[in-house]
Amino acid sequence: MPEHYRATLVDETGGIVTVEVDFGAPAENTEIVPDATRALARLNLKGGRGIRFTGKASLPVAMALAHAVAHLYGYVACWDPKLSGYVVAISHDPNIRPGDLLR
């Protein structure tokens, strides 16, 4: 079975995890979303202060990945190349709000 999506742990410092994501073999979101959640699950993430995603994702993939980790981490953020930083999408931390830019 071809791999339609990849997730790689690229950094884990001070309770903040960075995961790089990318598409694999061409497919529709109906195949990519389940592959993306399986790829993320293989990382065995334990939780922490925050998680940052960088790389390529369709909207359905991004939503599935965020949902998979939202209650493991204090916040979920994704890289915005236009802003050269991570934009917080979900937060359970009172000091970090959705829309905050983290560098």
Image: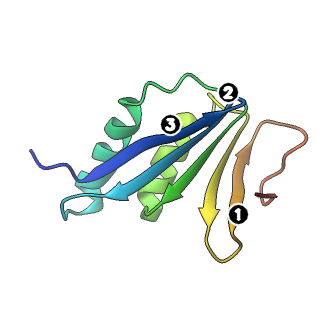
Task: For the N terminus, give its image quadrant.
Answer: top left
Q: Which mark is residue 48?
A: 2
- Taking the view exactly as shown, the residue that stands out farthest to the right is 95
Residue 48, image x and y in percent? 67, 27
Does residue 84 lie above or below 20 as drawn?
below
| Chain-order first, disc 3 or disc 2 | 2
> Contact, CB < 8 Å: mark 3 with mark 2?
no
Numbered disc 1: secondary structure: strand
Percent position (x, y) of residue 50?
69, 37
Question: Counting residues from the N terminus, which is met first, the one under dot 2 or under dot 1?
Answer: 2
Q: Which residue is mark 1?
A: 85
Q: Nearer the viewer, mark 1 or mark 3?
A: 1
- Residue 98 is tagged as none
> How far separated are the C-alphas under marks 2 and 1?
20 Å
Mark toward the viewer: 3 or 2: 2
Q: Callout 2, which amino acid?
A: Gly
Alpha-carbon neighbours of circle 3 within 10 Å: few (<14), some, or many (≥20)? few
User: 42 left or right of 64?
Assistant: left
Q: What amino acid is at disc 3?
A: Ala
Q: Position of residue 74 (x, y in %)?
A: 73, 34
**Which colour style is shown?**
rainbow
Residue at position x 69%, y 69% from top? 84
